[in-house]
Amino acid sequence: SKAESKQLWRPRSTSVKDRQSSKGQGGRASSLDSESSPDSWHSTQVPRKSVYDQLNQILVSDEQLPESIVLVNVAEWQGQYVSEQLQAHKQLVVSTCSVADIQAAFNTTVSRIQRYCNCNSHMPPPVKVVVAGDQSYLSVVLRFFVEQLASKTPDWLNYLRFLLVPLGSHPLAKYLASVDNKYSTLFLDTAWRELFSRAEPPTADTVDIAGRVAQFIAGASLSHQLPISEAMLTYKQKSPDEDSCQKFVPFVGVVKVGLVEQSFSASVDSDDATVCTPSLLSSAPASSTSLPYGRETVSTPPPSPSVSSGLSGAGSLSPGVEVMGLQVDYWTTQGLDRKKEGDKRETGIKNTLKSNFRSLQVSRIPSTGEVVPPSTMAMTVVTKEKNKKVMFLSKKPKEKDLEPKSQVIEGITRLICTAKHQNTMLRVSIDGVEWNDVKFFQLAAQWPTHVKYLPVGIFGYSKNV
């Protein structure tokens, strides 16, 4: 969705030396600290006063928690339209257009739940947090969820339930629709998808948005647990005398590297249509090049990696685009083997894939209709090798391109991806948010703190799953 193109923000960085000296979940949580870049989402570095005003209308008392809090991404027309529709029907909303707004809304909600717990002896009912936006919007909310709950007791995982209202590309919403027919009817039907895939707001109200959201809030009585995975990015600093830095990012959806083709079909399904950027691999210095979709931030050199949700462009690959030379080391659950006595860690079989990649994608989303999520990740790769020179009659020897080869590898517990050439920087999309200047990255199937699942609301499981 176009909402992704403005979501440019940069996290605080931590050098490898600092990372090694700070151990435990505290260090990992601190790496999730974020700050808005001067050019991000309307240039807001602090939460707008309107966010607190809206929160105060919803969080009226320490003695009583609201049934729901509706967070809407109003950085683009889709969220603005939804916000207007909901407010016209007396539904209170929190309109966010920056990372700072989201952080203020989520942290204020957590603080109010804490105050409720301090005033009451019984457990609070789960607060339904509606997250109306695309996958990258949920990604920001997820980071604050992981950060905030890292210091809370495990029972806090029962105090929140996230209700995903998809406005744009949202692979997780597509998965939820496969296990919950009622959710599918509300948010994955043709009318809803066509409405939010438009370039501009409709002239007439064709979908009862407020009614659908109200049904969801009233009926989402079950929490479905989505596993949270960890991406560790190692990236270069802008200053040559600084070490490489590391960043830990939680994700629940898809990590992409490379060039992904999109084929347009008659149906409007933004989740089937994976995004395409002109080049997800750039030779150093990558930081000086402009982002393919979205604005490059302008300021004094901020810490790497630059971050955007610039994966909103769509279309097929332009001819002649180079493939990426990558090495992927991954460990699978097959053949798990105990290490020496006293070492509780388990290790699977290590595999290495060296190739020229057209695309590489790792998913944590369960298979369609799969209620119990697997404990591992699945990787889809598209490689394109060249045959050795082939002689053609009456022609000079020429290299013959092989058809792209697609391969799916399941059961992955851990993965490390590096470029074959040292001076090549990777661009990595994590749940729709793009990270630049990445030297290499590592994925683990499970987030290491006790916050291992994201509770998402559904009506219930369909009979056929």
Image (cartoon, helix red, strand yellow):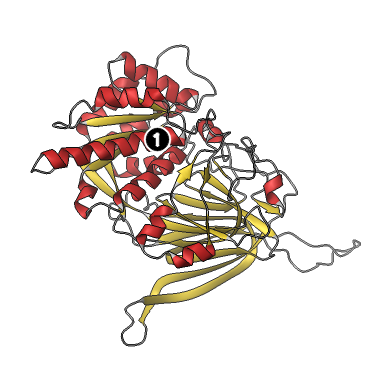
List x then y, in percent, for residue 271.
47, 40
Which residue: 62% across, 55% down?
A: 237
Please name whichever residue, 47 or 204, is drawn nearer the observer in this view of the structure.
47
Q: Is residue 133 visible?
A: no
Residue at the (72%, 49%) spot, across then down:
321
Residue 25 position within the rendered picture, expressed as x and y whole percent measured from the top left: 36, 60
**Horizontal and vertical percent position of residue 100:** 44, 35
In-front residue for pair 30/453 = 30
Residue topped by disc 1: 102
- Tell which residue pokes out farthest to the top in this image: 204
Quick one: 230 or 268, which is closer to the camera?
230
Residue 101's image quarter? top left
The local secondary structure at tag 1 comes to helix
Question: Which amino acid type is shown beneath numbered disc 1?
Answer: Ile
Outermost left residue: 121
Which of 372/404 is in front? 372
Q: Residue at 49% across / 32% down in the picture? A: 268
Crowding near the residue tagged with mark 1, few <14, some 14–19, many ≥20 C-alpha atoms within 10 Å:
many
Q: Which residue of the protein is positioned furthest toward the bottom in this rendering?
A: 341
**Percent position (x, y) of residue 152?**
25, 51
Q: Is residue 458 above or below residue 336?
A: above
Is 256 drawn above or below residue 115 in the view shown?
below
Name the image quarter holding residue 52: top left
Q: Is residue 339 visible?
A: yes
> What is the total number of numbered labels drawn onto the structure image?
1
Decide if residue 392 is on the left or right side of residue 140.
Answer: right
Instruction: Specify the quadrant of the image occupied by residue 326.
Output: bottom right
Residue 171 lies left or right of residue 358; in this view the side is: left
